[in-house]
Image (spheres, rainbow, N blue to C red):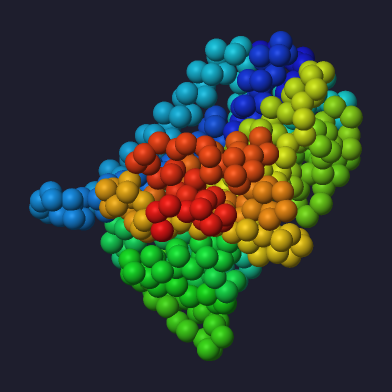
Amino acid sequence: MASKYDIIVVGSGPGGYVAAIRASQLGKKVAIVEKESLGGICLNWGCIPTKALIKSANVFEYISHAEDYGITVKDAKVDFTNMIKRSRDVANGMSKGVQFLMKKNKIDVIDGFGKLKSGKKVEVEHDGKKTEYSADSVIIATGGRAKELPNLPIDGKKVIEYRKGMSLEKQPKKMVVVGSGAIGVEFAYLYNAIGTEVTIVEYMDRIVPVEDEEVSKALAKTYKKAGINIMTSAEVTSVDTKGSGCKVTVKTKKGEEKLDCDIVLSAVGIATNLEGIGLEDVGVSTDKGKILVDDFYKTNVDGVYAIGDIVHGPALAHVASAEGIICVEKIAGENPEPLDYKNIPGCTYCSPEIASVGYTEKQAKEAGYDLKVGKFPFSASGKASAAGAKDGFVKLVFDAKYGELLGAHMIGANVTEMIAEIVAVRKLETTGHELIKTVHPHPTMSEAIMEAAAAAYDEVIHI
Ligand SMILES: Cc1cc2nc3c(=O)[nH]c(=O)nc-3n(C[C@H](O)[C@H](O)[C@H](O)COP(=O)(O)OP(=O)(O)OC[C@H]3O[C@@H](n4cnc5c(N)ncnc54)[C@H](O)[C@@H]3O)c2cc1C
């Protein structure tokens, strides 16, 4: 291991490892410091293992409804232990993949806890031994962890966060999920689909509150139909974990309610890993738990950069990676454009899936736009009918004056794959009329995008 590098990256999540690879492609001598497993939360405890578990739930749901497709299957059972094992195997495989990529790109991997030191140095502590490395540029990409609410302390046994939620030894019979953002509703879907009785407690007046209101309504309708109990405008005030289960006290508009369950899953957001990494010693400015950076991820300290969940902006893997690439391209003297935070897709992999980008209808109205809104339900789509996936819709929000696509909001099967078209269309400043004239293959779910655009301009064919 060398002691001097062009770039040292601290943290190997999708921000850090992607930045390291891009830096290496640009001819830099790079090291990456990681205290746990390569790939960060995303590969090990976030995006990937949750999707592996959700796939198991999808398979079970399919089999349970096989008769709808003219297939008879008897005695399908969930093997929870093997479901968890599969998810862990997938995550471990992905982490090994990052290990391979580090080797391929000649990036030195330094095991241990990295701490920023003045003079662009990083001290790495491993097994009680401290070693110092120096670099021309240091990128902090230490990411985040589950946020903990004061009235909902996580004990790791009955009150758990996402890591434990995807590695439980036993399937809970009853679970309360606190918070209905992407992580909360994904876990709620997953456990409900495999037979756990699930209650969602959400502080706001609707689930998935960052999404368009119609999407929230549609998800709530499907979830209720699937047997998920939803409490909105509700707050967990305490959890009593004495005894064999948990007694959860929930404050609602109607008064206090008590819920019994085996497990409470806290999914109330993300806290950042900025403690103990030397930020104060070196004088790096922070604000509300995030490192402050400019458009190219430079902090106030010369030679120190920060990307990913540790900086302001959406806490998403693809955002972290995009920031990492822009950051190192700028360091290497290239001329990257700043990231367009208005065109970042957000996806939730519950069933039905949710995908959105840009303004919601309400936000666009509040911003003063005169709107044309088009909506196409999957119940009118041939592919959706054939697939038995008629729940959901595509909703597009256009600026009436110039035809600019201000936002897209989708709920239904495969929409997390479909949203990339919208992101490209918005990047290319495609108008509503151009979208209508863009021939989409038949039969596909993506035809609903073309039809929703047509609906906005009173040209829709299939409704
Ligand atoms: C359950 C769950 C599901 C998610 N699903 C999705 C999804 O479907 N799509 C999506 O886009 N996003 C998803 N996310 C969010 C996504 O995981 C994060 O946005 C992303 O991982 C952030 O990347 P990052 O590189 O900033 O940091 P992280 O992935 O958090 O990685 C940071 C790394 O730094 C290491 N580290 C921290 N401090 C130090 C130190 N001092 N020294 C050395 N190493 C250190 C950590 O061990 C970790 O490996 C999900 C998150 C969770 C929790």
Identify the residue shown where x is 82% and y is 47%: 286
Occupied quadrant, residue 306? top right
Q: Is residue 362 above or below residue 28?
A: below
Identify the residue shown where x is 67% and y is 49%: 403
Q: Is residue 20 above or below residue 260?
A: above
Identify the residue shown where x is 77% and y is 34%: 338
Of 380 and 136, nearer the camera is 380
> Going by the image, does 419 lie left or right of 309?
left
Q: Position of residue 353 (x, y in %)?
A: 44, 52
> Going by the image, does 389 lie left or right of 268?
left
Q: Is residue 14 visible?
A: yes
Of 358 and 329, nearer the camera is 358
Of 376 and 357, nearer the camera is 376
Occupied quadrant, residue 445? top left
> Going by the image, does 149 lie left or right of 440?
right
Of 214 and 326, nearer the camera is 214
> Going by the image, does 289 lie left or right of 83?
right
Q: Position of residue 39 (x, y in %)?
A: 54, 32
Q: Position of residue 27 (x, y in %)?
A: 71, 10
Residue at the bottom extreme?
Answer: 254
Occupied quadrant, residue 304? top right
Identify the residue shown where x is 63% and y is 33%: 321
Q: Is residue 83 above or below residue 16?
A: below
Task: Indicate the quadrant containing the C terminus: top left, top right, bottom left or bottom right.
Answer: bottom left
Q: Is residue 349 visible?
A: no
Task: Indicate the quadrant containing the N terminus: top left, top right, bottom left or bottom right.
Answer: top right
Q: Position of residue 228 (x, y in %)?
A: 38, 68
